[in-house]
Amino acid sequence: MDTLTKYLAVAAGSALGGMLRYFLGSTTWSRTAAPFPAATFVINVTGSFVVGFFLTLATERLQMSAHLRLAVAVGFVGAYTTFSTFEYETLRLAEEHNFQLALLNVFLSVVVGFAAVWGGARLAREFEATAAAATPAAGRAGHAPFERQADPRAPARGAGAAQRDIRDATVEPPRDV
């Protein structure tokens, strides 16, 4: 995969994710829950769900191009989620002596965000279970070429590392499927 096209895929996804984040952050709804940073919270939770759902589909269930994986997981979700904004808003709450809201923001963002990424991954796996029941065993074997083509030098492939990494864009879908 050509380096320029990888960057263009990330840039395209980033543009869309950034615009959606700006839109949601500037809605009237985002200011109604003040001083609690509700818009940032909702953006982070939905971004967690999207990344859990999409990466589970992209790495475990479907044959997706590396360009699409980069555009969605790195570009779109990377620009859409707002972790640095979350940190800043939490600091502002603490500096304004709203310690309960600051702790609530941290607790809810971490716990609900984790639940969202878990829920997204679980839902993606349910799609596979439904599709597997309707697909002959030969069709389910389509995941094996991805595992065989994975770059063994990628950091995510080392001992004790996670099995997949969103930056491992060297995995291409098989040409004959």
Image: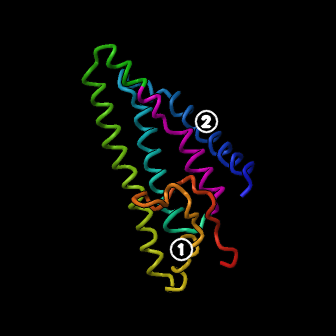
Residue, disc 2: 19
13 vs 145: above or below? above
Specify the segment rendered in magenta: 65-87
Query: In the depicted view, which residue is nearer to us: 160 or 171?
Result: 160
Residue 18, given in percent of the width and then of the height, sits at 59, 36
Residue 123, given in percent of the width and then of the height, sits at 41, 61
Which quarter shows the N terminus?
bottom right
Specify the color scheme.
rainbow
Q: Which residue is drawn at 43% across and 46% down?
A: 48
The residue type indicated by label 1 comes to: His
Q: Is residue 142 left or right of residue 39?
A: right
Residue, disc 1: 143
The residue type indicated by label 2 comes to: Met
Q: In which quarter of the image is residue 32?
A: top left
- The secondary structure type at the circle numbered 2 is helix
95 vs 4: above or below? above
Give the mark toward the camera: 2 or 1.
1
Q: Residue at x 28, y 18 (%)?
A: 98
Q: Main secondary structure of the magenta part?
A: helix
Q: Which mark is residue 122?
A: none
Measured in 3D between alpha carbons, the distance from the residue under mark 2 to the one under mark 1, in whole angstroms, is 34 Å
Mark 1 nearby-residue class (10 Å; few <14, some 14–19, many ≥20): some
Q: Residue at x 64, y 66 (%)?
A: 172
The earlier-in-sequence mark between 2 and 1 is 2
16 vs 144: above or below? above
